[in-house]
Every structure is written in structure tokens, then in C-alpha cells.
Image (tube, rainbow, N blue to C red):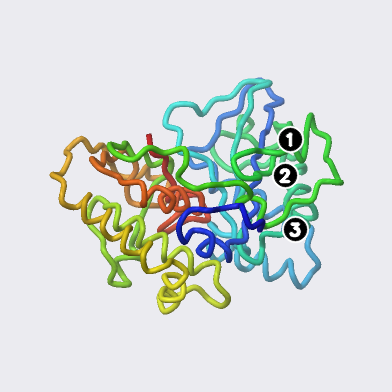
Amino acid sequence: MSANSQVDGGMLDLIKPVSLIRYLMVWRVTSPVVILPRCLPRELVTVLGNLIGTSLPTQQARAWRKTLAATATHWPIKAVLFAPYLASKRAYGKGELIVWELKLMGEDADHGLFLELILPAMEKAGTRKVDTSSRGARNLWGHFDIQAVYVSRGRSWEPLVEDGRLNLRYHATPTQWAEGLILGETMRSGFHYLTWLTPFEFAETQEKGLARTTNPTLRDLLDALMIRMTFFLPGRPNVQQLPEVLARIPSEEQKRIEWSLRQEESQPLIQQEALQASPKEWPGQKIGMQVFQDILSPLLPYLELASILHIGEHTHLGCGTFVLT
């Protein structure tokens, strides 16, 4: 990671352990109509996961299939398959584009893994018909081309695949996602609408004795982010690693964060919240919009980081991300 990739407060030290490659997929529909499942990531996990398993050596394939069969919601690698919940747009006609994002994380932020296993599985999924539901012949599988794949570098997206052609000379690294990225710079402090793009659930936070309310507060979101950061440290993520995460934030920065949280907590509650139960096809507890009266600038970089990494439960299926407007 370059020295000038992040300059605000203690954020540079905090994100140093974060290995992450973000791939933006653009698939073009090739049949008259396809109807997407209500929770696209679930089928992405299953269909692509099964195709990946067929490409692995026997011993690895056995372990891969065992994990997939046991969970049905996870690959045995650290990843996020993110497609926002769309209540209305599910039918796509010929030539329309379907966009979703794959995030490879930790030791699995490996461009070779993407090229050797995941991209070939996507190519097969575009041409092989798989009956996954009552949608039958109108489901997505066997009815799309890979129009493009982009890789993030800071706030930009660089082409890896264009018009179906792969650039074999392009090599994505697990640190380029943060190059030139000043987290929080596109957000404004003050009154904010926080809109969850996918459902969220903070059962993990509750179990570990950290702050949790029926509707999450800003403190809840930052607590969940600190837990998420243990995911990128060596060893199995656990709450005992939280002191190591917090030690990466200078004490003065921690004081600014705490002061900002207390300012928000001292404000009267705003009742313009539109949270509802998650759709039954999705994991998670709630989805919708929250309104916060006063989000101060020291909190903004951490909130944007939380939105990139996803927080809470079911992150493999893309849960736990939001936008601030």
C-alpha cells in the first residue's frame, strides 16, 4: 500500500491488514427474458460454487463440496457476493445488463484464484442451463454473456474484461482497493439518511456483549466494524482480537470518535425510520432506511469502511452494507 493511500487520522494503520480485491461483474442477458431470484447471492453461491467444485483436484473438490453442502450459503473461502436487494426489478430482457460485485478477502484476496477458478465458472454458468427453481427456462443460468469485469483501484474501476475479452496482462493486487482512497471524503457531516442496500443482523454483536439496540445506533455500527476488522488479522477471528484492532487507532483519534458518538447520542431521536423485516428469501433481520440527525466528520471514514467491508452476520451473501446520503 502506498504511503499516500490514506492520510486521515489513524485510518492508515487500521486498514493496513485489509487484503481485498473488488471485482464488478457486468453480465449481458442473451435470451428474450430472464427472471432473477429474489436473493441473487444465494444462487450465485450455489451455482457458481458447484461449478468451481468441478474444476478442483479431487481432494480439494471433496472439501469444497462438503463445505458447500453443509452451509448452502458459503464458499470455503473468504468472500462477499454482493447484489443489492431489488424489490421491483427482477425481469431482464435480451441485451440488458446485470451488475453485481465479488469481494475476495484476507488470504483469499488472490487474483490467480479469480482467474483460475471463479471466472471460468462464470463462463460455464453463462452457457449451461441449470434449473434452480420454478422459474424454469426463464432463470439466469445459461442465458448470459460476461460483458465486462472491472477491478477497483481507490474510487476508480479498471477493466479486466471488456466486450468479453480478458486482459491477461492485468494483475490485481490486494492493496489497490485503498490506493488514493481517503475514506469519508465524499460524505458530508450533519443530517444523514442511512439506507441499507442489503439486510443486516447484529446477533454476533449482541452475543459478545457489545452495544445493540432494536434499530442499530452509530455506536453499534462502529462496534460491528471493529469486530469485522478481526476477520483480517492472522488466525481465527474472535472478540479477543478486538484490543489489537483498537490499538491501531491512536488514542487521540479514539477520543474524537467517542466525543462524536456522544454528541449524536445526545440528540433527540428522529422517528423518520423506515426499517422493516428482511424479505423471507434473504438472511438478516431488517432492511430499509434510518435517519441520523448529527453524524460528525470523525465518524465518516469508519462508516464508509464499514460499508465496503460489510458488517454483522451473513456477509458472504452481501448482507450488512449501506449508503449515506
Q: Is residue 78 above or below residue 63?
A: above
Q: In the structure shown, which secondary structural element does the residue marked by tag 1 occupy?
A: strand
| 2 and 1 marks in contact (CB < 8 Å) | yes
Residue that numbered label 3 is attached to: 113
* Left or right, 101 with reference to 285: right
Q: In the rendered view of the protein, which quadrant contains the C terminus?
A: top left
Q: For the residue marked with disc 3, what is the amino acid?
A: Leu
What is the distance, in whole Å, between disc 2 and disc 1 at their CAs? 8 Å
Q: Residue at x 53, y 41 (%)?
A: 83
Q: In the structure shown, which secondary structural element does the residue marked by tag 3 occupy?
A: helix
Task: Report x, y in % for residue 66.
Answer: 63, 68
Which comes before the other along the chain, label 3 or label 2?
A: 3
Q: For the residue marked with disc 1, what is the amino acid?
A: Ile
User: Which of the 4 image quarters holds residue 1?
Assistant: bottom right
Q: Is residue 195 above or below residue 308?
A: above
Q: Is residue 76 above or below residue 188?
A: below
- Residue depth check, mark 3 versus mark 2: number of the one nearer the observer: 3
Give neighbour class at mark 3: few <14, some 14-19, many 20+ (Cα, 10 Å).
few
Give neighbour class at mark 1: few <14, some 14-19, many 20+ (Cα, 10 Å).
many
Residue 146 - label: 1
What is the distance, in whole Å, between disc 3 and disc 2 at their CAs? 13 Å
Q: Is residue 309 above or below residue 246?
A: above
In terms of depth relative to the viewer, which is nearer, 55 or 182? 182
Q: For the residue marked with disc 2, what is the amino acid?
A: Met
- Residue depth check, mark 3 versus mark 1: number of the one nearer the observer: 3
* Left or right, 17 with reference to 52: left
Count the marks.
3
